[in-house]
Amino acid sequence: MNVEDVMTSREDVVTVEVPGTRDDALEYLQNRQFSSVPAVKQTGDGEVFRGIVSRSSLIKRPDEDQLAMLAEDAPSTTADTPLAEVAELMIRDGERRIPVLDGERLEGIVTVTDIVYAIAHGELDDEVLAGSVCGDEINCVYRETPLTVAERELAFARVPYAVVLDDEGEMDGMVTEVDIIDVARVVEGEEETGDSIANQDDEWAWEGIKAVGNRYMPTRNVEIPNGPVSAFMTEDVISVSTKRPVTEVAQLMIEHDIEQIPIVSGGTLTGIVQDMHLLEALQ
């Protein structure tokens, strides 16, 4: 099976257009609950691909408004690439959405979900079990942790989820990057610049530069509610055992539109299966 057999073709790919603003991408990611969106530009020679705008780049660069600056380089593939090769590329580079290019032209997008869908529909046999691909390092957060702190914890851990624990240390829910970007909003305001004037002979005359003209400069920030994680988490968490076939795990992910499933054995949380883990079964 090749990329062209599972990818979303260009006519069905929603993109943001350069020049544009961060709000264009934020609205798309909130409405579609995707991790990123391709950016394109119209030129005299037609449409060209200009990079990927991810939900993580919007959060970590709150002062940048221009899509051209938020769009990041991304590894790409071609329509005739074997599915196992693009799965290996996603694992190696940690990319969830790979643009399918013909030169600079965007032909489509292949995603982790596309490959999970292929696994769910027979790309692997039922002998491959969840226990063979799951991870035993589980990212967790306490239910009363402020969501702002939980967002930083996910960023530092470099994972898109956290299992939420209650007062007894038992699994109480799940919070994800999607949950956070869902309630995030861009806030505009002003910041006082000060009015001191630096000597023109100073090597760095920043204070003088700040004081020229208006005493206030515009600011932009991503505001995340400061309520407890428990107010934003998913409470009804789907879980599986290590002996569940990977094909069934993939089917659960597609059915419930989720990217990770906890492994529970004897009522105890023992591991996690992320959708990226399923790609490893193709290697």
Image: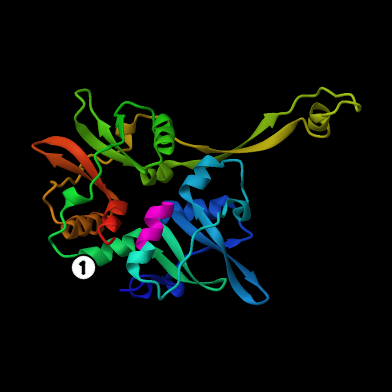
> What span is in magenta?
87-95
What secondary structure is the stretch in magenta mostly built from?
A: helix
Identify the amino acid type marked 1. His
Q: Position of residue 239 (x, y in %)?
A: 17, 45
In the displayed structure, 117 sits above or below 273; it is below
Which residue is at a point 27% across and 64% down the rendered structure image? 117
Which quadrant does the C terminus fall into?
Answer: bottom left
Q: Secondary structure at mark 1?
A: helix
Is residue 33 visible in the rendered image? The answer is no
Which residue is at a point 59% across and 54% down the rendered structure image? 67
Position of residue 15 in the picture relative to residue 145 (left or right) = right
Position of residue 268 in the picture relative to residue 71 (left or right) = left
Position of residue 58 in the picture relative to residue 146 (left or right) = right
Q: Position of residue 222 (x, y in %)?
A: 52, 39
Is residue 183 visible in the rendered image? The answer is yes
Q: Nearer the viewer, residue 108 or 103?
A: 103
Q: Position of residue 170 (x, y in %)?
A: 19, 30
Q: From the image, tell me which residue sits under label 1.
A: 121
Residue 192's image quarter?
top right
Q: Nearer the viewer, residue 104 or 175?
A: 104
In the displayed structure, 34 sits above or below 13; it is above
In the displayed structure, 250 sits above or below 236; it is below
